Image (tube, helix red, strand yellow):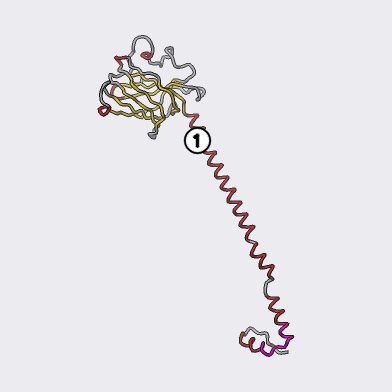
Amino acid sequence: MQHWITDDPTHFLRSMKTATPLQWKLSNRRRAALAPPERSRRRAHHVAHPLAAKENQAMTRMARIFAVMMLSMLAACATGQRMHHVDASARSANYTEDYIQDFWIQTADGENTGLSGVQVKEFSAGGTDGSECCSLIPGVGQTIKVVWRVGGHQEDESRWKTYSRDVVVLGKMPRNTQDHSVLMMRFFPNHEVEAEIFPGDGDFGPSNPRMDKLLFVGPRVMRHIGE
């Protein structure tokens, strides 16, 4: 039999011109054996799809886990803030002869807490204002920023002077931080200020030695910063 199966393509073409029917049949069988089956090719084409689906499922699970972790962290932060903050209204004691048009409480970062007060009288005129309600503020041991404006009773607002001080909150936290407490603001000469928490479980009243006497009926007693 003629040796027409060869790696030389030119020789192969010349040989195929004189190939017998048997040689054609053998050549076709050999090519069919070397070619991958059509079904195998289709199966190979589809093998990647289950792997891609598994990867997508894994990515989805990771995204869900990440979202749960972030929500847990936010909840923990909110819980931690509630534990170290207190719901309070504001009362004021003014130991100066400045008429305080208004004041407000900010966090140490300068964000407004929502707690404020207005029209704090001079010491000689009573030295107090009414109670202003209410907001969640940083608790005892934390720093707050107090901003207040001073001006005459009939003076135009454009002439008011603004002052601010960063102070550490004094006092005692309530046993239950959801109990309503009082933030006592004290204004002193030289534009100094104090902030003290009176917890909402019975410590706000004339029997408390820390309480400013001028808030209640009786003689006004001058107080100095740090007392």
| Residue 166: percent from left, percent from top | 36, 30
For the stretch drawn in magenta, the main secondary structure is helix
Q: Is residue 161 above or below residue 32?
A: above
In this orientation, which residue lies closer to the viewer: 197 or 30? 30
Residue located farthest toward the right when viewing the structure as drawn: 22
Q: Is residue 5 left or right of residue 198?
A: right
Q: Amino acid at mark 1?
A: Cys
Magenta span has 22?
A: yes
Which quadrant would residue 100 be assigned to in this image? Answer: top left
Residue, x 61% and y 51% (percent of image)? 57
Residue, x 28% and y 19% (percent of image)? 97
Q: Is residue 33 above or below residue 134?
A: below
In this orientation, which residue lies closer to the viewer: 49 or 95? 49
Residue, x 65% and y 85% (percent of image)? 6
Which quadrant would residue 11 be assigned to in this image? Answer: bottom right
Identify the residue under disc 1. 77
Give the position of the N terminus as an image quadrant. bottom right
Residue located farthest toward the top when viewing the structure as drawn: 218
- Indicate the secondary structure of the residue bearing disc 1: helix
| Residue 152: percent from left, percent from top | 26, 22
Magenta span has 110?
A: no
| Residue 69: percent from left, percent from top | 55, 42
| Residue 116: percent from left, percent from top | 38, 25
In this orientation, which residue lies closer to the viewer: 216 or 221? 216
The region drawn magenta spans: 15-25
Q: Give the number of marks.
A: 1
Crowd class of label 1 (few under 14; some 14 to 19; many from 20; radius 10 Å)? few
Q: Is residue 37 above or below residue 225?
A: below
Q: Is residue 61 left or right of residue 119?
A: right
Give the position of the C terminus as an image quadrant. top left
